[in-house]
């Protein structure tokens, strides 16, 4: 009798286990299906300015573009309408100006388009009149030459003159003149 009871309980346990495993398997996704069309989202990063589908950054920087859902693979990324070779992941690092879009696996429709602008880094240099060497007590005119819309002289320049492109000083000791040139994206 004990053997029949154990065999009966064993069969019930095995059948229950099989049903549980089968049921759980029905709820576990085998693969993540891509959204059609996919949605491309630029990821925030230092120096990256995002305004909807328009992204601006400085030369030498990059932005990560991610497509939904992140787990899907087989994406086809395009730059200015041309397929980017070997770009099959759901994320893409963009460094070059232009437009970017993607197609998800099994989807014939393109994603939204991201427009990327790469701004040049500002340049600046300082000239002086007279040209060094300059004797102590001699009045000097310094000119800051820059393509940046915003700039600042650094001390020893007095605060009142920090935003002028041409300054006149009379220095009494050796010094180094410095300025910072900035744009709204640096």
Image (cartoon, grey):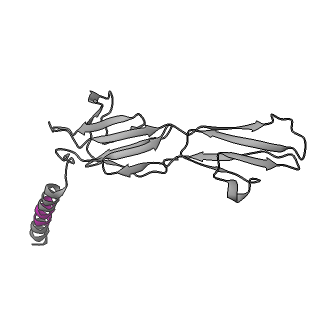
Q: Is 13 a magenta residue?
A: yes
Q: Is residue 57 visible?
A: yes
Report the residue at 16% width, 55% height from top. Answer: 25
Quadrant including the N terminus: bottom left
Nearer the observer, 102 or 14? 102
Residue furthest right in the image: 136
Report the residue at 80% width, 34% height from top. Answer: 131
Q: Is 116 a magenta residue?
A: no
Image-based side of 149 in relation to 165, left or right: left
Residue 125, image x, y percentages: 67, 37
Q: Is residue 92 visible?
A: no
Nearer the observer, 98 or 65? 98
Residue 96, image x, y percentages: 41, 33
Image-based side of 142 in relation to 134, left or right: left
Q: How many marks?
A: 0
Residue 34, image x, y percentages: 20, 45
Report the residue at 45% width, 41% height from top. Answer: 62
Query: Is 141 above or below relative to 19?
Result: above
Instruction: Give residue 20's quadrant in the image.
Output: bottom left
Residue 179, image x, y percentages: 67, 46
Nearer the observer, 158 or 105? 158
Q: Main secondary structure of the magenta part?
A: helix
* Residue range (magenta): 10-18
């Amino acid at each position: 009798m004990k053997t029949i009871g154990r065999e009966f309980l064993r069969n019930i346990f095995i059948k229950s286990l099989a049903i549980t495993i089968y049921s759980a398997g029905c709820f576990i996704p085998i693969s993540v299906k891509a959204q059609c069309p996919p949605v491309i989202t630029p990821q925030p990063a230092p120096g990256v300015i995002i305004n909807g589908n328009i992204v601006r950054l400085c030369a030498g920087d990059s932005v990560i573009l991610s497509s939904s859902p992140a787990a899907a693979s087989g994406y086809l990324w395009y730059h200015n309408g041309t397929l980017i070779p070997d770009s099959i992941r759901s994320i893409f690092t963009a460094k070059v100006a232009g437009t970017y879009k993607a197609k998800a696996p099994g989807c014939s429709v393109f994603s939204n388009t991201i427009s990327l602008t790469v701004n040049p880094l500002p340049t600046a240099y300082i000239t002086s009149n007279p040209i060094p060497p300059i004797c102590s007590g001699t009045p000097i005119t310094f000119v800051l030459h820059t393509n940046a819309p915003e700039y600042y002289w650094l001390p020893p320049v007095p605060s009142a003159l920090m935003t002028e492109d041409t300054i006149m000083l009379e220095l009494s000791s050796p010094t180094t003149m410095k300025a910072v040139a900035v744009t709204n994206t640096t």
